[in-house]
Amino acid sequence: MLERESNLKAWLYLAPALLLLSVFTFYPLFNSFYLTFLVGYNYLKPDKIFEAYTLVGNFKEVLSDKLFHQALKNTVVIVFVSVPISVIVSLLIAVALNGIKKLQGTFQTIFFLPYVTNAIAVGMAFAFIFNTNYGLVNQFLGWFGMDPVKFVTLGATWGTSMIALLVYTIWGGLAFKIMVFLAGLQNIDKQYYDAAKVDATPRSRVLRRITIPLLSPMIAYITITSFIGAFKAYRTVIGMFGASLAPPGLLPKDSLITIVGYIYSYIYDTAPGAISIAAAAAVILFVITLVFTFIQMWVSKKRVHF
Amino acid sequence: MEIRLENITKIFQAKDKTETVAVNSFDLTIPSGKLVGLLGPSGCGKSTTLYMIAGLLEPNNGKIYFGDEDVTDMSPEHRGIGLVFQNYALYPHMTVRQNIMFPLENIKVPKDEALVMAQDMADLVGIGELMNRKPRQLSGGQQQRVAIARALVKKPRVLLLDEPLSNLDARLRLQTREEIKRIQRETGITTIFVTHDQEEAMSISDEIVLMELGLKHKFLGTPPINIFNGEIKKGTLMFNDFKIGPHDGADGECVIGIRPEGFTVVKEKGKIEMEVAYVETIGRDTTLVFEYKAPADFEELEAEGVNTKEVSDEPVEIKMVTKTFKVIVDASYKFKPGDVVNLDVKSNKLYVFNKDTGEYI
């Protein structure tokens, strides 16, 4: 009796959240799966909202689309370059920050600021940093006698614009990672370091044999969430290159498109059936992300201590 | 190797600049090859002292010598110490073998040699079978042995143990203290450990160093020694109106300490004649508890919230409190509360101290 009553109460408390989740998360989730099986879907035609069912037709179309190949390539580059670099760099910064005593709070704030700054604004700032004529990067390269490189302006290649995008992506991802690592580092019992000190452990060995293993749960968490986040990259491209998703003049158009960008472009395409293409691409992205997450969890189970 | 602390002072400064003196002008000599216990109540600075010997804390003042060598400014890794932390600080992600080998790898001992040394040390402390386990798969006692093995494997000059038994259950404690004693005997290494437990200190150490000054802590044992405020009057030691015996100290107030077993029961004309307040029988001992009235001590007044610092011109009423003392007698005596008992004091069990300085007189 009592149990039933408390069950009822629990559901009552959960109801508001469940209601909102049902409308805005669960329904769209299942609906997008459903949409992938439709041909010629057009919600403006109430009498005949779609033409036929198909099992893999939309997937086939996505997978044979040149633009999707481009999007997949860009996304994979962003994921596999930016995530490892930003995890390593943020780990080193966090270790360094943890090591200083004076002004630690100040530096913590400075490193956290990018997290609360608008990504589009930061993207514009980065676009300026990489500007051919006025940008800091090209001025810096000029000191070494190098010619200005076109990163974001007319004449930029896929390679140079991707470099600029990666630098921005890495930088933008640092703040949160540093904070998480710093919290993890501060949770490590100081006695491990005292013990290491008494045993004459060199600093590099302390980092390699004590700090990183003890931080491994955090590192695993950050790596998994960063991979998921990087697969969803889109905001950074918009922030740097605007809605055109490419530096001016670079052909083909949308040359820096990501998978999420691809999905967006089909959502806003009014042609019948476009929404099903978007849904199919979303499901593909979902599967890719899922597979990667499982692989990582499997790896971290073997490598992460505790 | 002998360890000598000269005039060591350690002051901790909190963030709000308030200072706490943890150790104040402390002198200590620890003889070579001995197992020495640093005993004192919590917060008396005994762990601080241990960490200063280890080099993890720097004294604000004073010198530390290992033998003739001044190590005050030497960093911990050069001092040649092995340290066992209170919670052992075993690396959770390493196996027992990796933990024990870790100090050897740091000083670049070849791997096969390190493996042999680690195994020998593990055998010595009795965990040779557990080399492939992780610390969390070990009991508290086993973890501690790993910690001791890790501390000893690099052949330090001194072994330091911080509250080595505090994380163990009662049975394991007995066993472990024998182990520590044995390991120390077999290695002959100068060993210092910190404890707040008198029994622990007395049972394993060759010597005990008491920290924190003040009479209360000069005595060990359970039940604790009885402390009386007495007086020496013309060569006679007095407690209340009882003449305890002749004493050649200078006239004036003094403190008398008599252990509960320092009394004998006599038929009549005892030095102290009092009514038994109550009787406790534990095992083969019978403890008689006596009550008497005496002026409250300073500390007792403070504990009650009386402001003892305020100077007043008003005549102060002397507050009398009931104090007790305990006497252990043979269980063959059958006393009841209310019985009047005559007590003598064994002269060799009588300790008299100067009231102000706490010195034995």
Image: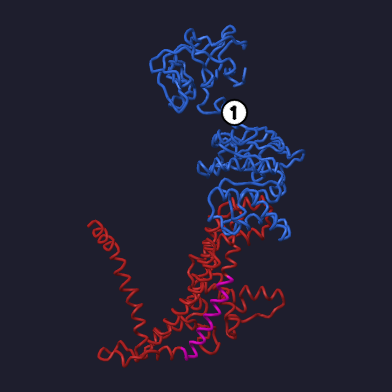
Above or below, comparing residue B72 to residue A15 in the picture: above
Residue B266: image x %, image y %?
A: 49, 12
Question: In the image shown, does A166 or B266 lie closer to the viewer?
Answer: B266
Residue B144: image x %, image y %?
A: 58, 48
Residue B232: image x %, image y %?
A: 57, 11
Residue type at numbered disc 1:
Leu
Question: In the image shown, does B264 or A192 lie closer to the viewer?
Answer: B264
Above or below, comparing residue B8 to residue B341 in the picture: below
Rendered red, the chain in question is A
Chain of the residue under label 1: B
- Residue B108 visible in this rendered orientation of the protein: no
Q: Which residues are magenta?
A: A63-85
Above or below, comparing residue B234 to residue A224 in the picture: above
Q: Taken as a whole, is the magenta stretch helix, strand or loop? A: helix
Residue A168: image x %, image y %?
A: 55, 73
Q: Quadrant of residue B177?
A: top right
Seen from this angle, which residue lies furthest front? Answer: B332
Question: Quadrant where the N terminus of chain A lies?
Answer: bottom left
Confirm whether the magenta stretch covers residue B172. Answer: no
Few, some or many residues within 10 Å of mark 1 (<14, 14–19, 20+): few
Taking the image as shown, residue B39 lies to the left or right of residue B286, namely right
Give the SS element for disc 1: loop
Q: How is the image coloured?
A: by chain
Task: Give the drawing colour for chain B.
Answer: blue
**Residue position marked by numbered label 1 in the rendering:** B213
Residue at the image point whose x is 57% and y is 58% from the top: B133
Confirm whether the magenta stretch covers residue A64. Answer: yes
Question: In the image shown, does A125 or A13 lie closer to the viewer?
Answer: A13
